[in-house]
Image: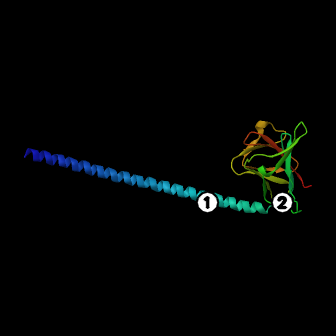
């Protein structure tokens, strides 16, 4: 009889312990479900935000593709120079944007030998603006530093886009810490 009582008490303890384990497991599953719901909602919001940003970029690209360049621009990098005309070779006004890595730079070594190169991809583009006396410099990836001539190196401003005005010299510090100068001029 004593063994039956002990067995009964032990089985009761196991039932209580098993019930506690079941309740804890159900609580943990419920909490995991809430966490998974939160994570899925957050990822859905992130996906929607990314899609909205892509739509905005597409809309801005469509608007930009219709804008005409009102100015030519000249870029210098060390002793090399390059530029782009606001008029296409066929006489039509240039539209849209010109990525910096598509502007061919020309230079001459002290020995007299000519050389050409492209500034490596910096994600910068020179874009047409609505006003004819300015151009827009825009970065797709990361901010860049720009300052007007006459300001000290530490007086530039870091931005994703900046307007450059006609006949004012600007300096842009590239990701590689090289400095280029850019000037917008009237059409030739």
What residue is shown with label 1? Answer: 51
Residue 74 in sight in this render: no
Real-space Cα separation, disc 2 to disc 1, in angstroms = 30 Å
Q: Residue at horizontal 61%, vertical 59%?
A: 51
Q: If you read the primary sequence from the N terminus, does the residue marked by circle 2 or circle 1 appear first? A: 1
Would residue 22 be found to the left or right of residue 48 on screen? left
SS state under label 2 = loop
Q: How did the renderer colour the structure?
A: rainbow
Q: Quadrant of residue 36?
A: bottom left
At horizontal 64% and vertical 57% (from top left) the residue drawn is: 53
Foreground: disc 2 or disc 1 = 2
Is 31 situated above or below 108? below
Residue indicated by mark 2: 94
Quarter occupied by the C terminus? bottom right
Q: Which residue is more in the foreground, 62 or 92?
A: 92
41 sits left or right of 173 in the view: left
Q: Secondary structure at mark 1?
A: helix
Could you classify mark 2 by the number of other residues whose Cα lies within 10 Å: few (under 14), some (14-19), or many (20 or more)? Answer: many
For residue 38, side relative to residue 125 (left or right): left
State the image quarter where residue 65 is shown: bottom right
Give the left or right position of residue 62, taking residue 53 as reference.
right
């Amino acid at each position: 009889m004593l063994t039956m009582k002990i067995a009964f008490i032990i089985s009761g303890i196991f039932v209580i312990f098993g019930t506690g384990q079941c309740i804890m497991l159900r609580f943990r599953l419920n909490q995991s479900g809430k966490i998974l719901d939160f994570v899925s909602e957050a990822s859905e919001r992130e996906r929607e935000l990314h899609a909205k940003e892509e739509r905005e970029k597409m809309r801005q690209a469509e608007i930009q593709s219709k804008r005409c360049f009102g100015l030519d621009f000249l870029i210098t990098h060390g002793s090399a120079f390059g530029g782009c005309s606001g008029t296409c070779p066929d006489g039509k006004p240039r539209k849209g944007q010109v990525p910096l890595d598509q502007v061919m730079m020309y230079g001459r070594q002290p020995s007299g030998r000519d050389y050409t190169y492209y500034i490596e991809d910096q994600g910068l583009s020179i874009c047409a603006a609505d006003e004819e006396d300015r151009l827009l410099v825009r970065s797709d990836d990361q901010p860049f530093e720009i300052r007007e001539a006459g300001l000290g190196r530490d007086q530039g401003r870091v931005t994703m886009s900046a307007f450059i005005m006609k006949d004012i010299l600007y300096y842009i510090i590239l990701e590689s810490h090289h400095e280029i100068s850019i000037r917008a001029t009237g059409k030739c």
